[in-house]
Amino acid sequence: MGYSRKSLAKAIVQLRENGIDGVVIGSTVYMVRLGFHELEDDVDLFTTNIMPSFDEDVVLNAAEALGCFLGQNEWGGPQLKCPIDEEEITVELHENIYDFYVPQEILDDAETLSIAGVDVRMIRVEDYLILKAKAGRDQDLEDLRYLSDLIKNGKLKIRRELLRQRLSLFDEYESKLIIKRLRDSEILI
């Protein structure tokens, strides 16, 4: 079951009011840009003002204040399932830890989009593609094929030069792997 843009905006505001802010890095990035009114999946929020693994008290206090169920995501980070109006929205909090890594340049280059009157920082679609290719799990590769179809059909615009630039943020092995996975998904750079 999905959630509205308004619920996303409210969740972001409520998290900020309770000490948690960040940059959206997950599928919400392309759904918003494609104009989806009902969003799906969880909201992957890379925190920029706390470290969820270290600032557990901030996360717990926010969850309690918002009436959220607090669990864990697949990376071991906090997952908040929050009631917003008549909907439930799941927000997963991320940071650079273990195998999960988002280059600072990608976070710094995030765009600020207005969602239901709230400024929300989101990584660029090109960066989402790079991170999906880097992760390389089955679901990530499936997502890349889906997005490849949208790109080929002209529904989703990307800047290939930005994709090429971002490869310099990773070591040679990772860059080659990212290129291979993008090409296997028919996303040419």
Image (cartoon, rainbow, N blue to C red):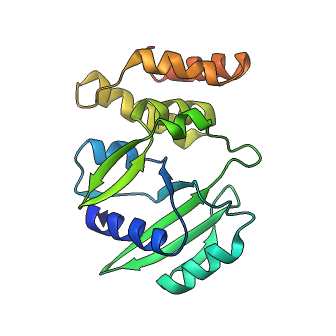
Query: Is 137 positioned to the left or the right of 152 in the image?
Result: right
State the image quarter where residue 116 is shown: bottom left
Number of numbered discs: 0
Which quarter of the rendered picture does the C terminus lie within?
A: top left
State the image quarter where residue 176 is shown: top right
Q: 29 or 178, which is in the foreground?
A: 29
Q: 3 or 121, which is in the foreground?
A: 121
- Estimate the x, y position of residue 8 in percent, counting from the top left: 35, 64
- Estimate the x, y position of residue 20 in percent, counting from the top left: 54, 66
Going 28% across and 61% down the picture, which residue do you hit?
A: 5
- Estimate the x, y position of residue 93 in percent, counting from the top left: 58, 60
Q: In this view, does 77 lie above or below 56?
A: above
Q: Is residue 186 above or below residue 99?
A: above
Which quarter of the rendered picture does the N terminus lie within?
A: bottom left
- Estimate the x, y position of residue 15 in percent, counting from the top left: 48, 70
Q: 176 or 122, which is in the foreground?
A: 122
Going 56% across and 30% down the picture, which residue do you hit?
A: 133
Query: Is 36 positioned to the left or the right of 174 in the image?
Result: left
The reply to whether residue 183 is visible in this rendering is: no
Going 71% across and 60% down the picture, which residue do you hit?
A: 76
Q: In this view, does 70 lie above or below 33?
A: below
The reply to whether residue 66 is visible in this rendering is: yes
